[in-house]
Image: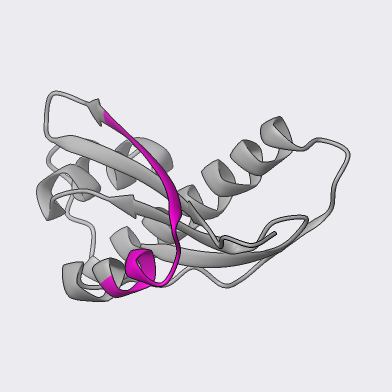
Amino acid sequence: TALSFKGHWSGTFELQTPVECAQMIAKSFVGAGDSDNMPPEAVGEVMCELANMVCGSTLSNLANDRIFDLGKPQICTAAATETLAASNTISAAKGLDLGGGVVTFAMSIESGR
């Protein structure tokens, strides 16, 4: 998933994970059991909300006295997120191994601000 943000800084925030890991996260997020099936649309909605929450929290921790406008999170292909990151120059990423897969959080901030 990816979303853009504008404010003190402008850029993009990405949350990347394998589908199986996204399903595991979504089930935990909504309190579903391991055997419960979640439609792909519901998994996507949870991942978009998670990206929104983590992006907002990250920006608040980096610049808590600033206001940011977060764009609408969307599901992206790997090629789309590479294009987003290539358009920005200052980037940071962190991967977390959840046991069922690695979740990568990445933020790119436009240069010149």
Which of 73/67 is in front? 67
Question: Quarter of the image containing the N terminus?
Answer: bottom left
Q: Residue at x 17, y 43 (%)?
A: 21
Membership of 86 in magenta stretch: yes
Which of 39/97 is in front? 97
User: Seen from this angle, which residue lies furthest front?
Assistant: 112
Snapshot colouring? one colour
Task: Please determine whether, in this image, residue 38 is positioned above or below residue 95.
Answer: below
Question: Quarter of the image containing the C terminus?
Answer: bottom right
Please give left or right for residue 103 compared with residue 110 in the image.
left
- Residue 110 locus on image (x, y percent): 56, 62
Please give left or right for residue 91 compared with residue 80 in the image.
right
Q: Residue at x 17, y 54 (%)?
A: 37
Membership of 89 in magenta stretch: yes
The stretch in magenta equals 83-95
User: Seen from this angle, which residue lies furthest right?
Assistant: 65
- Residue 46 locus on image (x, y percent): 41, 55
Q: Residue at x 18, y 35 (%)?
A: 102
Which of 33/5 is in front? 5
Task: Please determine whether, in this image, residue 111 is positioned above or below residue 54.
Answer: below
- Residue 43 locus on image (x, y percent): 30, 59
- Residue 109 locus on image (x, y percent): 54, 56
Q: How many numbered badges does the structure rendering display?
A: 0
Task: Please determine whether, in this image, residue 53 is positioned above or below residue 73.
Answer: above
